[in-house]
Amino acid sequence: MLQKTGRGLLALLLLVLDWTQPGLSSPLRPICDLRVLNHFIQEARDAEGAMKSCREGCGLSQSVTVPQTTVDFDVWEKKNAQEQAQEVQTGLWLLQQSPNTLQTSVTNTAMHSHIDNTIRNLLSINAVLRSLNIQEFTPPANATDLEGTWRVSLATDLLQVHVNFLRGKVHLLLSSAQACKQDVS
């Protein structure tokens, strides 16, 4: 686990050093660098792969509500930035609820570091969105009232949704965020 944390810190340090490199007139903010998101995606893939190879003590005790990961690009592009951000924040909130079920359901101790990493990464992505002034999601009283969701009952499906959500909607939101547009004047 220390090695994975060290890799994450090293990646973040390299991004900061790259950002402060002299000679760049208007660098992207490190938070906007999609390599950070790609790092989170890779760690999510690692967790998914580990869960797929897990044979015992790796199931969910109950099904969980997750966001739809498919993107209709015509519909997405017609939404304004606030609507896109709301959809991503809703999905992230749903994904943050599920690791609690995953933590209590999975008894295979080898998987716990992946689950902990998943939780940290979701919190980090929320911090990225906050730093871009994207409003946090306020959950409804009942998550079943949310549109664009479905339920999964397998841990591998949950982690696959996590990967696909990061690769899809989160990537689209960050790549088009106004605060991340580079000044080309």
Image (spheres, grey):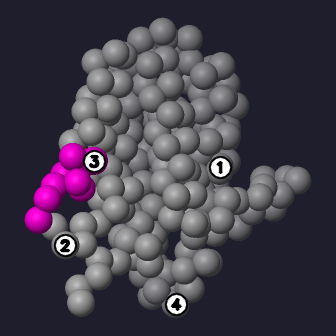
Distance in Å between CA atoms under marks 4 and 1: 24 Å
Circles 4 and 3, Cβ within 8 Å, touching? The answer is no
Quarter that holds the C terminus: bottom left
Left or right: where 16 falls relative to 119? left
- Tell me what residue is drawn at x 29 percent, y 66 percent: 28
Comparing labels 4 and 3, the label whose residue is closer to the camera? 3
Comparing labels 2 and 1, the label whose residue is closer to the camera? 2
The residue at which mark 2 appears reads as 25
- Tell me what residue is drawn at x 59 percent, y 66 percent: 134
Give the amino acid type for the residue marked by disc 2 in the picture.
Answer: Ser
Distance in Å between CA atoms under marks 2 and 1: 39 Å
Circles 4 and 1, Cβ within 8 Å, touching? The answer is no
Give the amino acid type for the residue marked by disc 4 in the picture.
Answer: Lys
Q: Which residues are magenta?
A: 15-23
**Residue 20 on the magenta segment:** yes
Vertical side of 58 occupied by 79: above or below: below
Count of all numbered marks drawn on residues in the image: 4
Q: In what element is the residue under mark 1?
A: helix
Q: In what element is the residue under mark 3?
A: helix
Residue 49 is drawn in which quadrant? top left
The residue at which mark 4 appears reads as 78
The residue at which mark 3 appears reads as 16
Packing grade of label 1 (10 A; few <14, some 14-19, many >=20) is some
The answer to whether residue 66 of the structure is visible from this angle is no
